[in-house]
Amino acid sequence: MPGRHFLQIPGPSNVPLRVLKAMDRPVINHRGLEFAGIAKALLDKLKAVFKTETGTPLIFPSSGTGAWESSLVNTLSPGDKVLAFEIGEFSAGYARAARSQGLEVEAVELDWGATIPPEVVYERLAADTGQAIRAVLTIHNETSTGVSTDIGAIREAMDRAGHPALLLVDTVSGLGCLDFRFDEWGVDVAVTCSQKGLLLPPGLGILCVSAKALRARERATTPRHYFDWGPMMAKNAEGYFPYTPATNLLQGLGEALDMLSEEGLEHVFARHARMAEGVRRAVAAWGLEVLAQPGARSNVLTTVKLPEGVDGDALLVESETHWDLSLGNGLGPLKGRVFRIGHLGDINDLEVLATLAGTELALRRMGVKVDFGAGVAACQQWFYANPLPGRVG
Ligand SMILES: Cc1ncc(COP(=O)(O)O)c(C=O)c1O
């Protein structure tokens, strides 16, 4: 199809031309001087996006799932107990990853659409008088349901309970879209990857680890090799990696971090908040419902409930086939019952409006009675009344 493909899934997100160009170069020697300069600068630059001065960023050639594993095998030992919250496919996946490493998971199952309630974190930790729980597994942005969690409030609940557990945060679809404060929130391990707010293709698993997490690593006995932080940190100090890194992706990451810093992180967050509100208004104008509970709705993506009898997977086939528009499918128990609109990364007002227009067309083909332009108009009105700061209104 001519024109641009509309990749509006909640990650991988669209890769900006600047980042593509930064990667479009001959592969360089990963043991050479040029690479060492690039890697050192990059690891330092990553600190800004995590909002940390004390944390250590680490990059593995992997996806987010590998970064999950890395967070667990370096800090915990088989038989250790962790507290996990299952509020969707990915938070449940993090808990599954923990079980696979021989950890004992105390899982709190909540509605898919709910956030992680700080009060429940407090109660579970306060009840753990023997302090058997070694880590709390949380998720900043649950990509299956479109729900965000207030990690600062989770930290506050942990402190109130006076519990020493590590705070592990999956911010795979949060970082670079939503405010993340590694130092202020006392995060011990933040887990993310390249293909969402960091504007790259898939291929990098990225972590930021605290001094406390590094101390936990010294005691942790879970077998680890590829994802071990020790050799990675030792080589990173010289600008290198213990094995062949994804050199071109790393060059792209440098460019992506520059783009985020040039726009200004606070502007990036405000842009995401504004686009998300526009999309939510469109969903309401269609007479459909957002899955996420009010107050927990993500600025990264919107998960939309479909009327009974309308198959979400078939809807995605319609949008792809006729309008070259990729929307996200329902995951796990939500399969077929919802669809997800990604509004993250390198995206602007007109791209959001075109996505909504394409979604209206596909919904109509599925027999959903939406008026053409209803969602688009609701979103336009919101954008018009709320110009981005720094733009002519
Ligand atoms: C919140 C969250 N965590 C973890 C993952 C797993 O990441 P990956 O598919 O890169 O392994 C995803 C993937 O979309 C995700 O959205």
Image (cartoon, grey):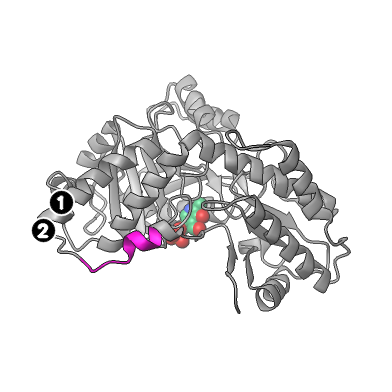
* Picture quarter with the C terminus: top right
Residue 20 lies, in percent from the top left, at: 39, 62
Mark 2 crowdedness (10 Å alpha carbons): few <14, some 14-19, many ≥20? few
Q: Quadrant of residue 89?
A: bottom right
* Residue at which label 1 appears: 36
49 or 271, which is in the foreground? Answer: 271
76 or 31, which is in the foreground? Answer: 31
User: Who's the residue at 30% across and 30% down the image?
Assistant: 53
Res 297 visible:
no
Residue 80 lies, in percent from the top left, at: 35, 43
Q: Quadrant of residue 307?
A: bottom right
Residue 241 lies, in percent from the top left, at: 18, 55
Residue 38 lies, in percent from the top left, at: 21, 50
User: Who's the residue at 55% across and 33% down the image?
Assistant: 150
In the drawing, what numbered circle is on residue 157?
none
Q: Amino acid at mark 1?
A: Ala
Residues marked 1 and 2 touching at CB (< 8 Å): yes
Left or right placement of residue 231 versus residue 222 in this view: left
- Position of 358 relative to 99 (above/below): below
Q: Amino acid at mark 2?
A: Gly
Label 1 residue SS: helix
